[in-house]
Image (cartoon, coloured by chain):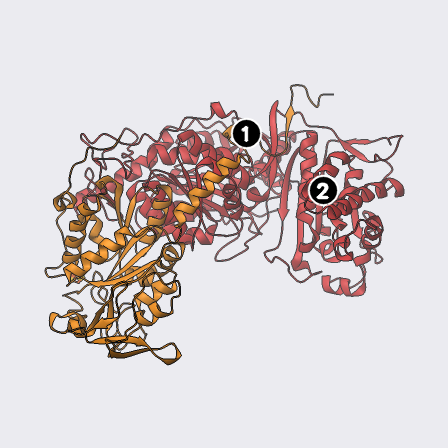
Amino acid sequence: MSAPLVKLTKKDFVSDQEVRWCPGCADFAILAGVQKLMPELGIAREKTVFISGIGCASRFPYYMNTYGFHGIHGRAPAIATGLKMANPDLTVWVVTGDGDGLSIGGNHLIHALRRNVDLKILLFDNRIYGLTKGQASPTSELGKKTKSSPFGTVDRPFNPLTLALGAGATFVARTTANDMPHMSSVLKRAAAHKGAAFVEIWQNCVVFNDGAFDEWSEKDVRDERLLKLEHGKPLMYGKSKDKGLRIGGGFTLEMGAADGAVVHDESRDNLSLALALAALEPPWPQVMGVLRAVDLPTVDQLAREQEREAEKATRGPATLEALLQSGDTWDVTAGAGDA
Amino acid sequence: MTVSAAPRPHIDLQNAVVRFAGDSGDGMQLTGTEFTREAALYGNDLATFPDYPAEIRAPAGTTAGVSGYQIQFAAHEVYSAGDQPDTLVAMNPAALKVHLPDLKRGGLLILNEATFKQSDLDRAGWKTNPLTDGTLENYQVIKVDFEHLVGKAVEGAGVSAKDASRCKNFYALGLVFWIYSRDIEREEQAIRERFKKSPPLAEANVRAFKAGYNYGETIEALDAPYSIQPARLKPGKYRNVTGNSALALGLIAAAQKAGLRLFYGSYPITPASDILHELSKYRRFQLTTFQAEDEIAAISAAIGASFAGALGITGSSGPGIALKTEAMGLALMTELPLVIINVQRGGPSTGLPTKTEQSDLFQAVYGRNGECPIPVLAARSPADCFETAYEACRIAIDCRTPVIVLSDGSLANGSEPWLLPDVNSLPKIEPDFATDPAGFMPYKRDEKLARPWAIPGTPGLEHRIGGLEKDALTGNISYDAHNHEKMVRTRAEKVRRIADRLDPTEPFFDPEGEVLVIGWGGTYGSITQAVIEARQGGLKVGHVHLRHVFPLPNDLTDVATRYRTVLVPELNMGQLRLHIRGQLGLESVGLNKIQGKPFHVAEIRSTIESLARRKHLPAEQEIA
Ligand code: SF4
C-alpha cells in the first residue's frame, strides 16, 4: 500500500518541540536548511530517521517531525548502522558535532565511513564544546585558550575532511551554515549519495567560540579565502576567479593564475588530490563543496545480498525445526537402555 | 577393518570420567569433542568440561600451555563433568604435572613416553623423572611411544613427517576407544568427513586412530575393556550441544517465532565469540550479524536495530559488558527490546579469560548509573542456554526492556545431550507493533507497563526517543521533578511485575528439610549431584536453581523457611548471597570458590553434610 501522493512542505517536517538553542546559534540555519530540503527529496516522513549523539547539535532530531533517536555521546553512527542494516528502506541521517563525532565517537565515525553504511552524516563543527560550556574540542586550533586550556591547547587538531577521506568515505564535503545556498546544494548532494556521506558544516557557536570561521567565511573575505569546488571545473577562486591551484613538482599543489588550474574531479579513485585539497591551511584558500563522491557498494546492500545468495543456494537448514535438528542427532525410544 | 573375531569380555561400568590433556597444539580439544560425539551418539548421558589456556600457543611443553578436556559419560543421568578422572591421557610431562593430582587413585594413566626426555622434564618443572621415581606407583600406567608408533602407522599415507606427528591425538583417541569399547566405524567416517579436503590427511588420521585402537588390543592394555551402556534418557530426538551453540539457537528460535529479524552485534571476546560464529552461519533466517568496531558499537547497533523493529541482541563477556553499560541505560530509557548476553569469565579486568567464574552478578543487577533495573536470567546447563535465551527474548519483546542473560565459560564450551524441543510448543512471542495513529502516545503503557513499539516506516507514528528523561505519556523531554520520580518508579515496577508472572518455585528433591541449596548458573550440575549424594546419606535436602536472578521469585523466602539452613554455593565471593539478603532479607551460608574452576561435587556435598550437623551457622563455609 503506498500512501497517497501528498506534496509535503517544509512545515510538515517541523516538530511541535520548542527549539532550545542559544539565540543566534548557527544550528538554527542548519535546521532550517534541512527542513527545507526534506520535501524536495520526495521521501515520506515516516521513512526518514534522524539519529544523534550528545551535544548542542544532537538535539536536532527532536525538532524534526520524522522518526528520531537522541542517542548517547558519540554513538550515533553505531546506532544508525544497526538501524540501517535492520531496515535498508529507511533514509537515515546522523547529526553529530566535533566533540561527539571526532572525540568520544571517533571510532564509530571512521568505521561507519569505511563500511560505507548508507548514512548522511552531518558534522556540525564549531571547534568547541558547547553543551558542557566551553572546553577545547578536537578541532580547536593549537594554542586555543578555553576553560579547559587557560594557557592554550597543546594538542593539534583533527582536520575532519582528511580524517573522513582517510577512513575511506565515499562522499566527503564541507559547507558553512552562513551560506544557505551553498549549504542547501551540498546537503542535497549528500542526500542523493548512495553510501556514507560525510558533510562537515562550519557552525558558529555564538556563546563559546564566536567568530571561529570569520576569517574565511565572512561575506567580505569569503571569495578570496574560500575555494568552492565544482565537479568538472578548474580549481579557481578570488572575486573575479582569477586565481587557481595547479599541480606542482613532487605531488604538491601550487597557487597561481586561474589559467592552467587543475580540473576538479569528485570521482577520482586516487585520494591524493582530495587529501591535498582537504589539508590546505592558510594562506591557502579553504575548500568548500564536494571533495569526493564515488560509488561503492554499501554494507547494508552487501549484507542483504549474502542473504539472498544463501536463500538461492538452499544450503543448510531452511526451517527452524531443521536447524535445531542439524548436526548429529539420535533418537531415544521408550525403554532404550533397559536392555 | 574390525578388530578381533572373538570379542573380549567387557567389564560393565555405570560411568566413567576421562580427561585428555596435552600441549595447546596437541589437539586435545578436538580429541575430547570426538570422544564426546561418539558417547552421545551411543546414547550415554554426558557432561563435558573443556579447560584451555588463554594463549593460543603458550611455550610448548610448559604447564602454562596445557589444554585439557574432560568428559563424564554414563549409563545413567549425569549432572557434572566429574570431579576426578578415571582415565587421564597426558601427552607430555607438563600435562602430567598439571593433571596428575586430580587422577583417581588407581586410575588409568596413558602417557606419551617419548616426551619424557630430560629437557621435557625440565620445561615442565619435574625435578626427577616421574616415570622412574615412584610418582606413578599408585596408578595403572600405559606408556606409549606415540612418535614412533604413529610414524609407523601412517607410513605411506602420503603426509609429511610433521603432519604425521600431528596424528598423535587420533592415536590416543583410538586407544581410549578400545578401553571403553566404543564403535570405531562411526568415528572413522567422522574423521574422513572432517579431513575431506585432504584425502592423505584423512587417511593418515584414520590409520593413526585405528592403530591406537589395535594397540590397546595387542598389548592387552587392560584385562578386559570397559563398557558403559546407554543411559535411560527421556524419549525423543537428541543432539549434543555446547552452551554457546544452544544459546545461539535459542536466539534464532525466538526471533523466528516472533517473526522478527535477528540482529546480533558483537565484538570478538573469549568465551563469547562462538555465539557470533554460530549465528554468522545462518543467513537464511533473516539474521544480520554485525562484527562491530568495539563493544559499545556492538550494543549501540543492536539498539538501533531494535528501534527499526528487529530483535537487537549483543553478546560479550564481563570486560565487554562493562563497556556496554551506558548503552544498556539507553535501552532502558528508550524502552526497546534488547538482549545482552554475558558469558562470564574470571575477572576483574582481563582476569582469567578462558576460565569460568560467576562474578558478574552484581555487574548485571546493580552495575549502571541511575536507577536502572534490568531483568537478569541465568542459564544452568549447556542445553538450558537454549530455553534461557528464548525466555530472555520473550521478556524483552513483551516488556520492551533490555534483558541480561548470564552464561559462563564452563557452560559456553561444555556440552551435554539436548532433548530437542518441539518447535510448535515453544511459547508464543508477539511483537505487536503499533500501527494506529489514533491516540498514539509513545509512552502510553499496557497492563505489563510496556510502551508501544512503533517502528520507523509506520505512517503517522513519527516520534523521537532518547536517553533524556521523558514525559510519562508523550515521551517528549521532561525535566519535571514529579514526572521523573513517576518514570523511575514505573520502570522499576515494570520489571518487578515480571516476578508476578513466574511459575511457583518448586525445589528439586526434598520440599522441606535440613538444607536448601540455592544456586544459579553453571553450578547446577555439581549442586544436583551433591544433593543426590547427600540425600543418599540420609539428609533431607532441597535445591532451588534460579533462572530469574532479577527480579527474584516472589516466593523464594517462603520456600526457604521450610529448611533449617540455606546454602548458596557460588564461584565468586558471595554475590547471590548478598543479593538475596538485600532483596529479600534472606540469610544464607555461602560456599565460595574463586579458582576459575567449577565446583567439585565433593566440595558441595561435604558442606551440605557439615551444615546439616552444625548448630551455629557460619556466614561462609570453607571449601573442605
Ligand atoms: S552553546 Fe553554542 S553551539 Fe550550543 S546552542 Fe549555544 S550557541 Fe549553539
Chain drawn in orange: A
Quarter of the image where one finds residue A143: bottom left
Task: Tell me if I can see residue B565 in this picture.
Answer: no
> Looking at this view, is A142 or B593 the one in front?
A142
Where residue B143 sits in the image (x, y, percent)? 83, 50
Structural distance between the alpha carbons of marks 1 and 2: 32 Å
> Looking at this view, is B610 or A261 the one in front?
A261
Residue at the spot x=18%, y=31% of the render?
Answer: B439
Q: Which residue is mark 2?
A: B18
Amino acid residing under circle 1: Ala
Chain to which mark 1 belongs: A
For mark 2, give the secondary structure: strand
Chain to which mark 2 belongs: B
Chain drawn in red: B
Q: Which residue is mark 1?
A: A322
The answer to whether A176 is drawn above or below residue B4 in the figure is below
The answer to whether A76 is drawn above or below residue A242 in the figure is above
Of the 4 image quadrants, the one containing the N terminus of chain B is: top right
Of badges 1 and 2, the one in the foreground is: 1
**For this view, does B78 lie left or right of residue B136?**
left
> Looking at this view, is B406 or A299 the one in front?
A299
**Do the residues marked 1 and 2 share a common chain?**
no
**For this view, does B430 lie left or right of residue A44?**
right
> Looking at this view, is A42 or B227 the one in front?
A42
